[in-house]
Image (tube, rainbow, N blue to C red):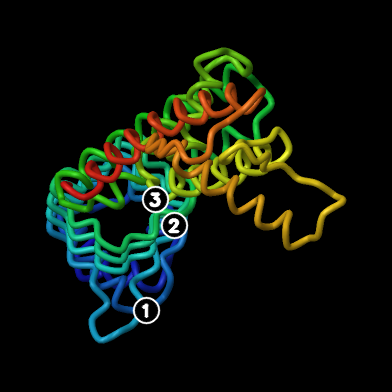
Amino acid sequence: MLAADFRQIAVEDERIWRQNDREEESELVKMLEQRAKTGIAMDGFKLSRVDLKNIYLVNSNSRSGYNFSNCDFYRSDFQSAHCFMVDFSGCSLMKANFKYANLHCANLEDCNLLGANFEHAKLEHIQWGEDILQEKMARKTTDFKERNDLYQQAEEIYRHLRIVTEDEGLFDLSGRFFRKEMVTRRKQLPLYSGARILSKTVDLFCGYGEEPLRIIGFTLLTIFIYAAIYLFSGLNYAGELLQINFDESLGQNLYYFLDALYFSVVTFTTLGYGDITPQGFSRFLAATEALSGSFTLALFVVVFVKKMIR
């Protein structure tokens, strides 16, 4: 069969592309490029272990890329390929090689990315999806061993994506992958173990160092909670007791709360002006707030600087 005849069949008969026993692959790159230009979706094609180096799959003068959803590209070589806006959603890209490939704006949602190589690839504005395939599968399975194996795979994928995006200068995306890497690692730990609880606490508190605004939210919440407790436990100002009193007016109690809020702020920040002092149980509360405030402010500086110097 001549190459020209084979290319014609490739357009007219999709069965040629849905099996791995094609008779001739010496001009596969050209044949696939021509097949893509027909504009017909290439859903479910079987293209595992094929050499697609330097293939040009850019749908010029169009707002949408070529559709290769649910295809099998296991161990295929896309080195230096041009895949701008290509829809790879649902594909098996396991151990595929995308080194130096252009994947700007491509859709990689629900792909199997285990072992895929994205070194030095262009990865801006890719649709990764909220979670990768293995993480979604791990949440659905009820088998403990299978779930842990899937989370291990997800951790490996997120680690590779973190490294390659960091090398490309995509630091926000790298930070997102780092957090997902830590989450999938945490979910491999025993449910009620101390390590898992500590890891979850760090995630809630600062998103593993990637969410400094969470620390600000925690700071404000802590200050208001302590202020409310001080309002009931009582503070001392020049011999006057600052404490909620339901026999007094709402305005007066609001004034007491503002004093308690002021004391909570200076205690949390360890300023300690000394004009208002704790008494009774409030002394213990002030000590714990000062400790948590010192730790929180130091952590915020570390996380903020880390984000800024990237």
Query: Is 226 situated left or right of 232 in this image?
Result: left
Residue, disc 3: 46
Residue at screen point 65% across, 56% down: 255
| Sequence-wise first label, 2 or 1 | 1
Residue type (three-letter) at the residue carrying disc 1: Gly
Residue type (three-letter) at the residue carrying disc 3: Lys
Residue at screen point 23% across, 81% down: 60
For residue 180, say whether it is visible: no
Residue 152 is drawn in which quadrant?
Answer: top left
Residue 36 is drawn in which quadrant?
Answer: bottom left
Residue, disc 1: 39
Q: CA distance from mark 2 to mark 1?
A: 17 Å
Residue type (three-letter) at the residue carrying disc 2: Ser
Vertical placement of residue 135 versus 147, above or below: below
For residue 164, say whether it is visible: yes
Question: For the residue labelled by badge 2, is the local secondary structure a helix, a strand or a loop?
Answer: loop
- Checking the image for residue 301, the label placed there is none
| Sequence-wise first label, 3 or 1 | 1
Q: Residues within 10 Å of mark 2 (few under 14, many from 20)?
A: many
